[in-house]
Image (cartoon, helix red, strand yellow):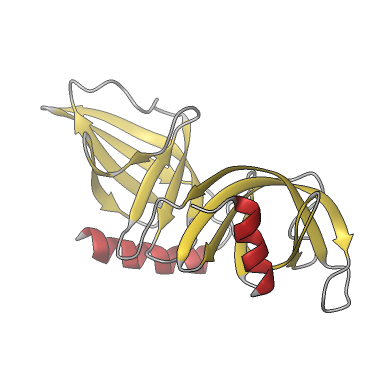
Amino acid sequence: MLDPRTLLERAAEQRLTCEVMPRSGLAWSKATVERVERGGVVVRAASGSLPSGADVRCWIRVDGVPYAFDASVVRTSVPVSDRSDSGVMLGFIDRWEIATRTAGSLVLEVLPPTGGPVSLLGGAIQLVDLEAHLWTVTTPADSPLIFVEGGGVRLRIALPDSAPMELAARVQRLTHASGHLLYALQIQDVEAPERYADMLAAARVAAGL
């Protein structure tokens, strides 16, 4: 894999679109890569969508390969090519990686407070149902508890060749049944309900639900 600066310079040359989401938010917004400077990368974004000081997660496809990385908004009101000051400088770029989803794949994951994401599409955790306001998953009864009833979790959903969407959820119910544990994960406020509905419908088909 090429170094991040080289990839971002290629993205700037082609004025590629990236998707950016504040770590405290639930919705992605589109931005255009403008140029790479010493302090980071300048992107053109909708006014007010990326406030100064925000920590963000970014997703971009360069030369057909999807990448994700973390960054911070270090400066706003930066002049850009459309002669406006709608640019923001993203600095402190970190955790650059090839995105986990690839063409033809579906991603449904739990994002624990520590450690890497946990897939809901295999292994000990099995997806039972996907509803707009409730995801239901199960684990074997002898598995360690992965959720605490009443506790909060974050979920990630992604379709092939698209940026993921992260959701806040609460463990509404934990049921001890014969041979397994059943968790009901209640989805909290969704900032982009239409996009979420479209993604959920496609995910249900892909997961065979």
Residue in the foreground of this view, choosing between 62 and 150: 62
Residue in the foreground of this view, choosing between 43 and 197: 43
Q: Position of residue 90 (x, y in %)?
A: 74, 52
Looking at this view, name the residue that lies furthest to the bottom: 82
Left-right relation of 116 to 27: left
- In the rendered image, the quadrant that contains the C terminus is bottom left
Residue drawn 31% across and 22% down?
145
Residue drawn 26% across and 51% down?
129
Q: In which quarter of the image is residue 70?
A: top right
Left-right relation of 121 to 55: left
Q: Position of residue 97 (x, y in %)?
A: 50, 47
Residue drawn 33% across and 40% down?
184
Indicate whether 156 appears above or below 118.
below
Residue in the foreground of this view, choosing between 15 and 131: 15
Number of numbered markers: 0
Q: Quadrant of residue 46?
A: bottom right
Left-right relation of 95 to 56: left
Residue drawn 32% across and 58% down?
106
Left-right relation of 115 to 79: left
Asked if residue 209 shows in the view, the reply is no
